[in-house]
C-alpha cells in the first residue's frame, strides 16, 4: 500500500529542486536518506528529507502495526511542479525597470512497500492447489 506526501509553495526554484529529487527517485528509503544528508544542495535536500519523513509517517499511519524498516519502503514516484511566482521590480539604468521572478514549487512524493502481503500469496496458493 502506498502513501503520499506533498510539499506546496516551497520557496525554491523548481529547477534546483529537480536536481535533488532526481537523485532519490526509485531508491530505497535508507539510501535516499543517506543521499539527501550528504548532498551539496543543503536547503533543497533538507526540505525533501522532511517530506520523505512525512511520507513514511503517512505510510505507517495507513498500515497500522507495520514498521517501515521491516517492509523495505522505496520512493515509488517523486516529481516537482511549478508553484506560484512572486513578481518584483528592480530599478535599472536610464529609468527602466527589470522584473524579478521569485519562483516556488510543489513536490509530490509517493512511498510504497517492496514486501507483498503474505495473506494474498497464501490465498492464491490454496486456490491453485484445488485445481
Image (cartoon, rainbow, N blue to C red):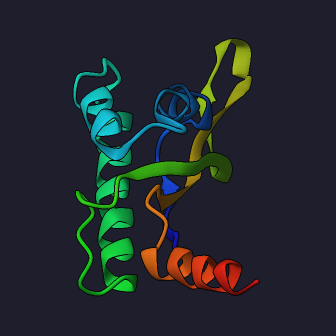
Report the label total: 0
Residue drawn at 72 percent across, 13 percent down: 94
Residue drawn at 22 percent across, 31 percent down: 37
Q: Is residue 76 above or below residue 91?
A: below
Judge from the rendering whether residue 130 lies leftward or rightward of residue 35; answer left or right: right
Q: Position of residue 7 (x, y in %)?
A: 47, 61
Quarter-of-image position of residue 31: top left
Q: Is residue 10 above or below residue 20?
A: below
Q: Is residue 126 above or below residue 42?
A: below
Q: Position of residue 84 (x, y in %)?
A: 65, 56
Q: Position of residue 96 (x, y in %)?
A: 74, 23
The front one of 128 and 59 is 128
Residue drawn at 53 percent across, 25 percent down: 19
Q: Is residue 60 above or below residue 45?
A: below
The front one of 91 and 56 is 56
Judge from the rendering whether residue 129 lies leftward or rightward of residue 11; answer left or right: right
Please identify the quadrant where the C terminus is shown.
bottom right
Judge from the rendering whether residue 42 lies leftward or rightward of residue 115; answer left or right: left
The front one of 55 and 81 is 55
Q: Position of residue 73 (x, y in %)?
A: 39, 54
Amino acid at each position: 500500500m502506498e502513501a503520499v506526501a506533498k510539499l506546496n509553495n516551497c520557496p525554491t526554484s523548481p529547477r534546483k529542486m529537480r536536481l535533488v529529487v532526481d537523485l532519490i527517485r526509485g531508491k530505497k528509503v535508507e539510501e535516499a536518506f543517506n543521499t539527501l544528508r550528504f548532498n551539496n544542495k543543503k536547503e533543497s535536500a533538507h526540505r525533501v528529507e522532511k517530506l520523505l519523513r512525512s511520507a513514511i509517517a503517512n505510510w505507517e499511519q495507513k498500515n497500522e502495526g507495520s514498521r517501515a524498516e521491516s517492509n523495505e519502503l522505496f520512493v515509488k514516484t517523486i516529481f516537482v511542479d511549478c508553484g506560484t511566482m512572486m513578481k518584483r521590480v528592480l530599478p535599472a539604468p536610464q529609468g527602466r525597470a527589470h522584473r524579478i521572478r521569485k519562483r516556488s514549487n510543489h513536490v509530490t512524493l509517493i512511498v510504497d512497500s517492496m514486501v507483498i502481503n503474505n495473506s494474498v500469496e497464501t490465498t492464491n496458493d490454496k486456490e491453485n492447489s484445488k485445481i
